[in-house]
């Protein structure tokens, strides 16, 4: 809760329009279209749904190949597998968990249909390289910008560069409404059909604008809309976006400046990436060190979490993977640790965390008392 979330929920109920595509949905749509210049956006009930809409819009079918990083959340791949695609997993960079664009060209075959890029921790992938490769081979680019609200590639907002972009408003993201998401349609040719897929395969959105006398079943689709009750909550959060982002960035910088660690343990940020302080992670020297640090922090009442297991080694997909090792993805699975970063984290808590991490590495004496409550991510 950072602003008017509950007031807006009560208002949504009073207005009587609690289903999808209501008053607050339109407020949220306008917010994104005005603030970031996105051509067209549609709130969905999750980023997973937005990715599934993307797969339908791109007509992904059996036999198509889609390139997806291995070090990501399952939905980045699963949305395309649902349509019958084969996933060709890409490795991470050596210097950060994003996909290694230099290896992409070698993964493209005549069957490749799309590249799904994931901006890990809200840090931009090399979108110039990816978009020019996509142009050369006539491929679509879907940005999984689940973690990337208000983050930029040079001066361009993430989610607004590929043909389609997908955001998440899950509880774990910078801005949330419990569960929620959004599809951004940057390529105009997809706009009309996106609305139809969004509304269960009907042209209801067009009907609601008064463009049709009745609405009918015209395509495939599903119930991808977000309830206006959740959109009301989301709008309350969006109004406070700058405040949330300023505070998160402060926390991020405070870690960066006060943790006494070798340079290569910190996130490595490419020059073109203006990140959004979605999370703060450390890359430990070994799995042993990471596990020891994690156990140490958890024992001190500080939640510290690893992140993704590599999808190419998952029980569901390992037998379909082509056998490439993808050693950088494995490296992040073994060595990456996330430490608490949320809007509500106060400076006393953060200084305690900093002290404990410095103590782990340097056995520095602890200056701060432990907070009474466990500090969550
Ligand atoms: C959170 C996340 C998702 C899933 O978002 P939902 O809104 O929970 O469906 C997908 N991809 C990435 C990279 C994520 O971080």
Image (cartoon, grey):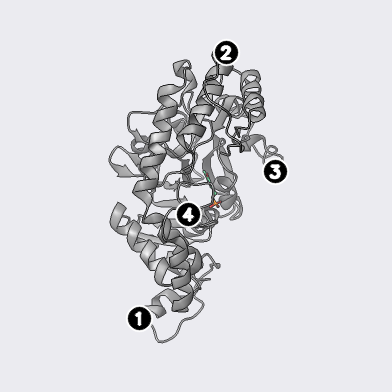
The answer to whether residue 37 of the structure is visible from this angle is no
Q: Residues within 10 Å of mark 1 (few under 14, many from 20)?
A: few
Specify whether 71 is left or right of 210: right
Image coordinates for residue 333, horizontal then vertical, percent = 60, 29
Describe the element under mark 1 as helix, strand or loop.
loop
User: CB atoms at circles 3 and 4 under 8 Å apart?
Assistant: no
Which mark's residue is nearer the viewer, 2 or 3?
2
For the residues labelled 2 and 3, the Cα–Cα distance comes to 43 Å
Considering only order in the chain, which callout, 3 or 1, is on the residue closer to the N terminus? Answer: 1
Give the residue number, with chain letter if any, for mark 2. 363
Q: Residue at x 53, y 30 (%)?
A: 91
User: CB atoms at circles 2 and 3 under 8 Å apart?
Assistant: no
Describe the element under mark 2 as helix, strand or loop.
loop
Tag shown at residue 1:
4
For the residues labelled 1 and 2, the Cα–Cα distance comes to 69 Å
Which mark's residue is nearer the viewer, 1 or 2?
2
The answer to whether residue 68 of the structure is visible from this angle is yes
For the residues labelled 3 and 4, the Cα–Cα distance comes to 37 Å
Image coordinates for residue 8, horizontal then vertical, percent = 43, 67
Which mark's residue is nearer the viewer, 1 or 4?
4
Image coordinates for residue 223, horizontal then vertical, percent = 55, 68
């Amino acid at each position: 809760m950072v602003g008017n979330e509950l007031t807006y929920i009560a208002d949504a109920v009073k207005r009587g329009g609690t289903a999808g595509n209501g008053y607050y949905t339109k407020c949220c749509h306008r917010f994104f279209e005005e603030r970031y210049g996105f051509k067209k956006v549609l709130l969905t009930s999750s980023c997973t749904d937005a990715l599934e809409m993307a797969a339908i819009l791109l007509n992904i079918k059996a036999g198509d190949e889609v390139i997806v990083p291995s070090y990501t959340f399952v939905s980045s791949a699963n949305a395309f597998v649902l349509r019958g695609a084969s996933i060709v997993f890409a490795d991470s960079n050596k210097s950060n968990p994003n996909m290694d664009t230099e290896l992409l060209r070698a993964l493209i075959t005549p069957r490749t249909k799309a590249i799904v890029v994931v901006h890990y921790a809200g840090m931009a992938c090399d979108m110039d390289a990816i978009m020019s490769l996509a142009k050369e081979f006539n491929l679509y680019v879907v940005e999984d910008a689940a973690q990337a609200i208000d983050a930029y590639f040079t001066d361009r907002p993430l989610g607004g560069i590929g043909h389609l972009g997908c955001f998440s408003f899950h509880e774990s993201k910078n801005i949330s409404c419990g569960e929620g998401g959004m599809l951004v349609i940057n390529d105009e040719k997809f706009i009309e059909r996106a609305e139809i897929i969004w509304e269960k395969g009907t042209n209801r959105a067009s009907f609601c604008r008064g463009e049709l006398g009745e609405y009918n079943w015209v395509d495939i689709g599903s119930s991808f809309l977000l309830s206006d009750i959740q959109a009301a909550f989301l709008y309350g959060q969006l109004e406070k976006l700058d405040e949330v982002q300023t505070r998160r960035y402060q926390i991020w910088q405070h870690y960066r400046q006060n943790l006494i660690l070798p340079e290569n343990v910190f996130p490595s940020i490419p020059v073109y990436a203006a990140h959004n302080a979605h999370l703060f992670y450390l890359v430990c020297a070994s799995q042993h060190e990471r596990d020891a640090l994690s156990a140490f922090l958890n024992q001190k009442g500080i939640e510290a979490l690893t992140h993704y297991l590599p999808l190419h080694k998952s029980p569901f997909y390992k037998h379909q993977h082509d056998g490439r090792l993808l050693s950088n993805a494995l490296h992040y699975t073994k060595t990456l640790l996330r430490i608490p970063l949320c809007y509500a984290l106060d400076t006393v808590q953060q200084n305690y965390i900093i002290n404990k991490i410095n103590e782990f590495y340097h056995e520095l004496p602890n200056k701060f008392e432990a907070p009474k409550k466990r500090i969550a991510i």
